[in-house]
Amino acid sequence: MGTNPVPNKKLAIFTATGCRACENAILDIHYQVSSLARCADIAFWPYMLGSEVRDLEKQESIDVCFFAGAIRTSSDREAALKLREKSRIMVACGACAAFGGMPGLVNISQWSVVSGQSQRTMDNKQQTNEEEKPELPPLESRVLGLPQIVKVDYLVPGCPPTQNFLWAAIQSLVCNGQSPARLSFAASRLPEAIAQAITSGILPPKGSIFAGEKAVCASCSRVKEEKRFETYKRPYQAYEELGRCLLEQGLVCQGITTQEGCGGLCTAMGQPCRGCFGKAEAIFDPGAKMVSAISSTFDSNDAQEIAALVDDIVDLVGTFYRYTLPTQCALFSTPSKD
Ligand code: SF4
Ligand code: SF4
Ligand code: SF4
């Protein structure tokens, strides 16, 4: 395909349980997609090529796999295991693969109940039309992030990942040594190790996360005035004051606990951060840290008032762990495969 003396990399792109916007994001690197086409051959991509997991048997090996989506069904697990077996580099692409994502919120339900309902739905359908027996893969007992079932080499978080870090991942993992090094759309936000990997052509250290090094607050354009809020507000209730920190205005903004990298995309538009890049490195549990941050920003020192305020937050788990419940909530997570 290319004229480069270095052989093209074999690329696999796959979504397990997810919305496929991560795959679209890979194409959303604008004109840089031509650089990708010059240094990679797509060996496996169900979404664009109609590939099937059994086709992987024909592949001797894959150089880089971008795996999106959470592990929710037996076929997700089968694909993850097979792609790991075949791939030299496995990348968890997007919040669903990296952390369990929004599909992972189902883990707060009693799984036996959910599973039972699902089975009943299938049974009903089978009774109404025997000819159309759905062949749905069995559900896993709980939704998992990719690192919980296979060893993952790199993470590109976000829902979906942002162009700058996806392009950085493609340059350093796929195009390294094959295309002229060009730093990212926003090179200034790349951690040093990743910027160096792009320019040197040497792979970044295993385990690297293609994201910033601090929390979203560090790159948010809003100003913190060290003021306390008096009333908690939901986004539709607030006429936010332009330029002021949303948390200090009473909106539950998770920029404090979330890994930087998007540059504060949501907060710039007046919407609170919901944590799609996962927790910042220094944070142990993002939900617990958010309760603490809200408590200290609320204009009260009364423990009961503070507890009532936190209780008042609608869908506490769905807010604080929207993208991360299976992997980053201390109560629900299980260890990753090392
Ligand atoms: S991380 Fe977001 S964009 Fe990617 S598959 Fe999951 S829901 Fe879709
Ligand atoms: S809490 Fe939210 S709005 Fe406030 S500075 Fe941090 S990211 Fe910006
Ligand atoms: S502001 Fe938060 S939710 Fe929005 S893109 Fe950035 S990390 Fe994701």
Image (tube, grey):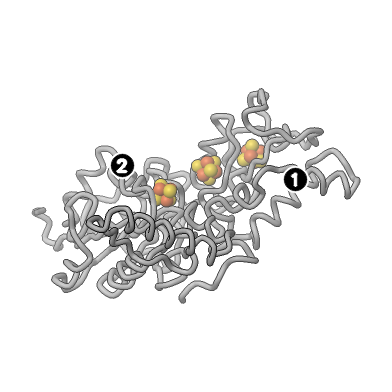
Specify whether 202 is left or right of 53: right
Specify whether 329 is left or right of 249: left
Counting other residues with Cα less than 10 Å from the Cα at mark 2, is it few (<14), some (14-19), or many (20 or more)?
some
Q: Quadrant of ligand 2?
A: top right
Nearest the eye: 186 or 91: 91
Pointer 1 with pointer 2, Cβ within 8 A: no
**For numbered disc 2, what is the local secondary structure?**
loop
Point out the residue furthest to the front here. Answer: 127
Specify whether 205 is left or right of 236: left
Q: Position of residue 189 (x, y in %)?
A: 48, 46
The image quarter containing residue 64 is bottom left
Q: In which quarter of the image is the N terminus?
A: bottom left
- As drawn, 176 above or below 303: below
The image quarter containing residue 224 is top right
Task: Check residue 223 in the rendering and tell me which mark sits there, or answer none.
Answer: none
Disc nearer the start of the sequence (1/2): 2
Nearest the eye: 287 or 166: 287
| Amino acid marked by disc 1 | Ile
The image quarter containing residue 146 is bottom left
Residue 191 can be seen in this image: no
Q: Where is residue 228 in the image (x, y as percent from the top left)?
A: 80, 36
Mark 1 against mark 2, which lies toward the viewer? Answer: 1
**For numbered disc 1, what is the local secondary structure?**
helix
Name which residue lies at 22% across and 52% down: 179
User: Circle 2 is placed at which residue position?
Assistant: 29
Name which residue lies at 20% across and 44% down: 34
Nearest the eye: 38 or 125: 125
Name which residue lies at 38% across and 64% down: 73
Specify whether 119 is left or right of 327: left
Q: Where is residue 62 in the image (x, y as percent from the top left)?
A: 22, 67
Q: Marks 1 and 2, Cα distance to the nearest angstrom? A: 36 Å
User: Circle 1 is placed at which residue position?
Assistant: 294
